[in-house]
Amino acid sequence: MRIAVIADVLGEENNGTSITVKRLISNLRQRGHEVLVVAPGSSEEKDYYGVDKIDFKIFNGYVEKNGVVLAKPNESLLKKVIEKCDVAHVLMPFPLGRAAVRICSELNKPLTTAFHVQPENVSSHFGLQKSKRVNDYIYRNFLNGFYRFSQYIHCPTEFIADQLRKHGYTQDLRIISNGVDPAFEAGQEEKPAPFQDKFCILSTGRLVKEKCQAELLKAVALSRYADKIQVFLAGEGPQEKRLARLGEKLANPPIIGFRKKDDLIRTIHFCDLYVHCAYAEIESIACVEAITCGLVPVIADSKKSAAKYFAQNPENLYRAGSPEDLAAKIDFLIDHPETRKQQRDQYIDYARRFRIEKCIDKMEEMFQDAVEGRHRKQII
């Protein structure tokens, strides 16, 4: 198939969406599909059609601080690319994506979309991530301005598919994990010398409000083992300075910074525990990558996060918003290394379902169904 992949955000691999889209493109090409990419910026990559970035004027600094850029629509280019493809897969409900789905509708071109942007990811920029009224409005805005043009929506988890149904989305919702890179394999490595006597805890993700990494730092301060714990926050974002200031109070200040794939895998392999505090999460491949490598997790039970469904045992969940409960779960797992050893094998086995090849099989099926006009009846 000739597939157009259209993404408003596709830059450095410093956020889950960019990583996911690049992995999809690479795997589709490996299977012999011709993939035409429309995204912001320029690239020497074959069949990459770059568009300008939106100029946010005085807010450009804020946008850059968040590590993402948004694409400026180029309707003539979009039409040229969409006319050539068998099916268009449009990733995000922002200006480039909205222009693309309208053009697909006008050309009667087979179209699929994806739900990668949770309303809470948008409302968090205004401190309103817990406002039901605001988030319900964003769900409606996404539907009316974008998703209504598409009969297929890729949903990374059953959790987000259920949220869409509750908000009036009646399309063919395809529940397909974004998948884990094969490089993430079970393994263990010796801790670097400075951390030999430390209990190492990893948390991976953008340093933004809705990821709630501050809960982990507060929990460590409450732990009976505070002087033995070393936290690694693998990520970057606007909350970095705040988290660093908070971490200064700990016996062992957190090590904060973005880690490239190989370095991240090494870090996972020598850490003792993975903690995921996010308030809002559509899937959290970062969490899946950790458990795929055998790192036992403790995950917030937030009602707005799909990550909680990865927890296989009560001790792997804590009450979202409660550093006290998180501290208790951390202390329990420090006190019971035999539990962590047993759960390590449990999580490695559980994570096999997220292998990328299985996920690409399902994506191919969705694209072919779109080309042939096959729809699945939704259970509402």
Image: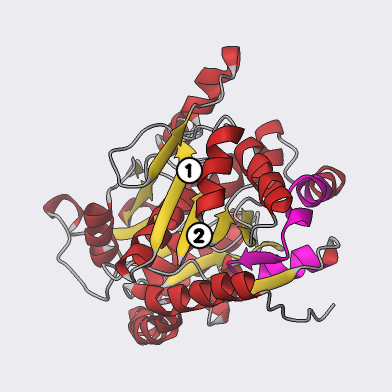
Q: Indicate which disc residue 38 carries.
A: 1
User: Is label 2 in a helix, a strand or a loop?
Assistant: strand
**Real-space Cα distance between discs 1 and 2?**
33 Å
Query: Which residue is pictured at 59% across the width and 19% down the height?
Result: 56
Q: Indicate which disc residue 276 carries.
A: 2
Give the farthest residue toward the left.
193
Query: Which residue is pictured at 81% across the width and 63% down the height?
Result: 169
As rendered, which of 175 and 245 lies closer to the eye?
175
Q: Is residue 163 magenta?
A: yes
Say if 171 sits above or below 7 in the image: below
Counting from the top left corner in percent of width and height, residue 327 is at 51, 60
Query: Which corner quadrant of the image does residue 31 belong to?
Result: bottom left
Residue 215 in sight: no
Question: Dot 2: few (<14), some (14–19), or many (≥20) neighbours within 10 Å?
Answer: many
User: What amino acid is found at the position of numbered circle 1 in the picture?
Assistant: Val
As rendered, which of 18 and 39 lies closer to the eye?
39
Magenta residues, start to end: 138-165
Query: Which residue is pictured at 39% across the width and 87% down the height?
Result: 349
- Figure quadrant of the N terminus: bottom left
Secondary structure that dominates the magenta span:
helix
